[in-house]
Image (cartoon, rainbow, N blue to C red):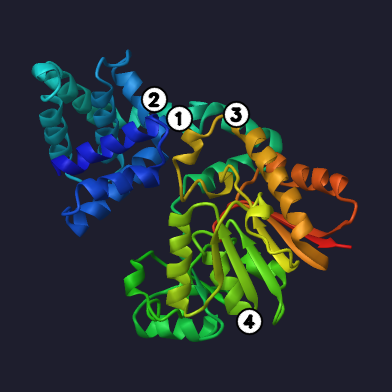
Amino acid sequence: MSSIQTLAAHVLARIDEGRTLTDALAEIWQRHPDLPAGNRAALQDLAYGSVRRLAELRFILRQLVPRALPEPALERLLTVAIYQLAYTRTAPYAVVDTAVTEASKFAGGRFKGLANGTLRNFQRQQDELLTKASRDLEAGTNHPRWWVDKLKQAFPKQWLAIVEADNSHPPMTLRVNRRHADADAYLATLAEAGLDAEKLSESAVRLARPLPVRELPGFADGVVSVQDFGAQQAAIRLDVKEGQRVLDACAAPGGKTGHILELADVDLTALDVDAARLKRVEENLDRLRLSATLKAADAAQPGTWWDGVPFDRILADVPCSASGVVRRHPDIKWLRRPGDFAGFARQQAAMLDALWPCLASGGKMLYATCSIFPEENRQQLAAFLTRHPDASHLGDEALIPCERHDGFYYALLEKR
């Protein structure tokens, strides 16, 4: 109990330093390899929950303690404890006792009474404080104020639904490998295992509740993969045909790579600038018993990796703000800054311009992002079409985060 609460506070410290939630937890797993599986799961839930509701928790703490404490680590500890009291089933006395014990380690025990009083006051005023937080724009939405303003500008009628989706727990959706089965057949397999799920498409099912992948029937044999339903649209929209030469730029962790190869026997090259992340692509393909040419290279620098033979299809899943997958990565909304979006847009434009000459005449390139904001989507598409008169726009779609899928943008281009 003590270590879980303290380690969750440590995660918040790393996010304040600009680290991602994924990296912060990976650091803890590395430092505490013997942490029991149950404790790991509890810590992950506590860390994700605290980050998801960070604005609300900090607002409430300021109502209880008007001025910032001289010990930032104590602030984070109390933030985590307030989340536990409000949103978990952990016994309240255990939450308070643990926090007080941990607080006694700061400044020679000077904050022990403050920690106890703060958490006891929260217990007494919980309903009132939560209601007050809900009326504050930032605390009520659990998004930075500037992010909410940006959503309102881009989606005047949908911004609140997007906020609600961002703050929800993401569904666990599976992609059924069409080389093995279809959704109906796999639903029957799940039913035999006592697992509830629903069909989303001929090759996608959504589980009623998440579970470890090792418990998924056929996962180890490549029958299914975990992939959001929105993300599954990429390989489908790329429209690959047997025998084509295909490039998957920015391929890691390999979900879309595997899906392309499940759909057709193609000569596929998978790129990623990070060799370590490319290893995950290899592991995914090994599990699926599929193969591709893997290259650790920068897609925006074709001179370092391209052999000059044009590709029939290019999946340009470019770097972006990841604003469409906030519910899976709640730290994104706290790590991003208003100026980041223009930087991503410039990076995307450079990559698209670099990849376009690699596409064969009559070939198709799918521009894909997991962002919902226009400067990374339709504005980028319009600018690209202006720069490249030999590009035909075959259609685009913006997927807004909802119960069925995360947020994505897809635009299909053909070289005339």
Mark 3 vs mark 2, foreground winner is: 3
Return the residue at label 1: 139
Whole-angstrom CA distance, mark 1 to mark 4, is: 50 Å
Q: The disc labelled 2 sits on which kind of residue?
A: Phe
Return the residue at label 2: 59
Return the residue at label 4: 265
Q: Is residue 312 left or right of residue 372?
A: right
Which residue is drawn at the image coordinates 58% and 32% (left, top)? Answer: 147
Chain-order first, disc 3 or disc 4: 4
Whole-angstrom CA distance, mark 2 to mark 1, is: 6 Å
Residue 280 position by quadrant: bottom left
Return the residue at label 3: 338
Whole-angstrom CA distance, mark 3 to mark 4, is: 42 Å
**In this picture, is 84 found above or below 288?**
above
Q: Is residue 207 visible?
A: no
Labels 1 and 4 touching (C-beta < 8 A): no
Mark 1 vs mark 4, foreground winner is: 4
- Where residue 83 sits in the image (x, y, percent)? 30, 37
